[in-house]
Image: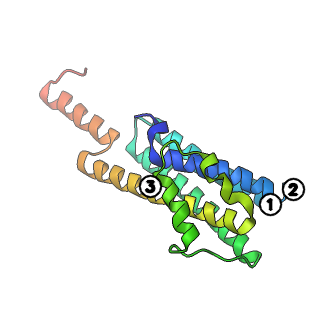
Amino acid sequence: MSYRELKSYQQATIAYDYTVEFCKLYVSARSRTHDQMVQAGRSGKQNIVEASEQRTSQKSELYLLGKARGSLQELLEDYEDFLRQRGLRVWGKDHAKAREVRALAYKTNRSYWTYKPYLENPESAANSAICLIHQANFLLDKQIDALEGRFIKEGGYTEKLFKKRLGYRDGGLSPG
């Protein structure tokens, strides 16, 4: 499976694109926060790419997915700070608009453009981003849990190589 087919990657890409536009509209380009938010969004997406391309080590894959999760969590905190520092309302998970944004995840062919209308004002924009990031984090948590389960059940690359080495050495198995 290509990383582009991963729901976590798709959601992180939308969150990254949305963040770039959010920052253009509501965060001064001269501020450190602007750069940090854009970089956190990019890092969340790019670490998923790098993790899925790590074909030799589940340990590395778990590490990189954890880094992606951490980057998105950092971005989530930035959006929460944005709302708090401006005295803007934070939507609860049962808020009508939050449910509306979360429901967009079930649309096919979603992209940044699906969520663009929520950029109309800073409160809606930041809260919508929070919804997007919570969904991406949920998907990453599921992906990490599944990978950890597979790692526990099957072992990692190094462990498998070691078993093959022992089989070769002790049983005369061929190296190929």
Residue at the spot of label 1: 27
User: Contact (CB < 8 A) between labels 3 and 1?
Assistant: no
Q: In this view, does 1 lie above or below 149?
A: above
Choose between 79 and 111: the one closer to the eye: 111
Residue type indicated by callout 2: Arg
Q: Is residue 95 above or below residue 20?
A: below
For this view, does 163 lie left or right of residue 22? left
Residue at the spot of label 3: 139
Give the residue displayed 36% in from the left and 56% down from the top: 145
Q: Position of residue 63 (x, y in %)?
A: 47, 51
Q: Is residue 66 among what the camera can see?
A: no
For this view, does 43 lie left or right of residue 157? right
Looking at the figure, which quarter contains the C terminus?
A: top left
Q: Position of residue 130 (x, y in %)?
A: 60, 64
User: Contact (CB < 8 A) between labels 2 and 1?
Assistant: no
Alpha carbon distance from label 2 to label 1:
9 Å
**Quadrant in which residue 172 is drawn:** top left
Choose between 145 and 156: the one closer to the eye: 145
Residue at the spot of label 2: 30
Q: What element carries label 3?
A: helix
Q: Earlier in the sequence, mark 2 or mark 3?
A: 2
Residue type indicated by callout 1: Val
User: Contact (CB < 8 A) between labels 2 and 3?
Assistant: no
Q: Position of residue 159 (x, y in %)?
A: 29, 42
Alpha carbon distance from label 3 to label 1:
28 Å
Choose between 129 and 140: the one closer to the eye: 129
Q: Which of marks 3 and 1 is nearer the N terminus?
A: 1
Q: Where is residue 153 in the image (x, y as percent from the top left)?
A: 24, 50
